[in-house]
Amino acid sequence: MKIHLLDADLHFPPVSAAGDHGLLAVGGDLSPARLMAAYEHGTFPWFMEDEPIMWWAPPERAVLPTQGLKVTKSMRNILNRRPFRITMDRCFEEVVRQCQQAPRDGEGTWITDDIVDAYAALHDLGVAHSVEAWRDDELVGGLYGVSLGRMFFGESMFSTQSNASKVAFIQLVRWLALNGFGPVDCQIMNPHLASLGAVPWPRAQFQTQLNLFLHAAPTMTGPWTPHEHHLNA
């Protein structure tokens, strides 16, 4: 495959130019403008420490339609007990740091310090958001991602207590559905996401829905501060 090298402008090659595994381009930077251009284009950064910045548009995309959320009977029982208090945008950088430090079966993390700084900058601009799960006053789980138009692009989640991140994710998807969002971009499929209702979409299908929901409504910038009752009902 031809490796596309990014330069100083924000142009990405067509996603159809990605290699068999989805590698679209290499290089560039993690500036807010480039990151937002990447998500709008249908690509995302994923690389390890000491690797060049790599941008991906996989041939199959893990997507969770907001109306396709699966909540098992056992999870409904957990939700009914309300073991966690769910909030949004209360401690964005701490959530990203917790995701950075989460165990990964001996593998390193792609959430480098540069990634933390880059997404903190997006949060300052009001387009990156966190969801937090609390037990009493302790942060025990959460996730973060980027939102443009009516799309939410999930990045990572963590949990230090059983089911904390899952509860946070479920409540996020429910809130997104109430606010007219399209499918949640989960990037790469795994059994955990599949159990919640994520499905693999061909790249072309994802791009069609991306273009639709990017322009469905203006981006909800700034901290997301829904009434906690709506996130914990």
Image (cartoon, rainbow, N blue to C red):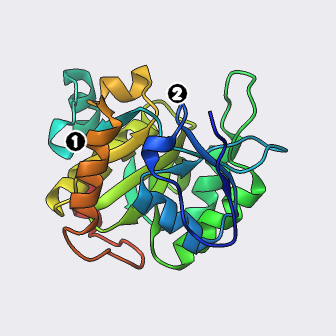
Label 1: element kind: loop
Judge whether 91 appears above or below 67 on screen: below
Q: Residue at x 31, y 52 (%)?
A: 172
- Depth check, front residue: 202 or 19: 19
Q: Position of residue 122 (x, y in %)?
A: 55, 71
Q: Amino acid at mark 2?
A: Asp
Q: Nearer the viewer, mark 1 or mark 2?
A: 2
Q: Quadrant of the N terminus?
A: top right
Label 2: element kind: loop
**Is residue 146 visible to the viewer in this orientation of the structure?**
no
The answer to whether the residues at label 1 and label 2 have Cβ atoms under 8 Å apart is no
Q: Residue at x 44, y 24 (%)?
A: 190
Residue holding disc 1: 65
Neighbours of disc 2 within 10 Å: few (<14), some (14-19), many (20+): few
Judge whether 144 appears above or below 71 on screen: below
- Depth check, front residue: 180 or 86: 180
Residue holding disc 2: 20
Mark positioned earlier in the residue sequence (1 or 2): 2
Q: Position of residue 15 (x, y in %)?
A: 45, 47
Apparent side of residue 162 relative to residue 224 in the rendered image (left or right) = right
Apparent side of residue 55 relative to residue 106 in the rendered image (left or right) = left
Q: Residue at x 55, y 33 (%)?
A: 19
**Picture quadrant of residue 150:** bottom left
Q: Amino acid at mark 1?
A: Pro
- Depth check, front residue: 2 or 115: 2
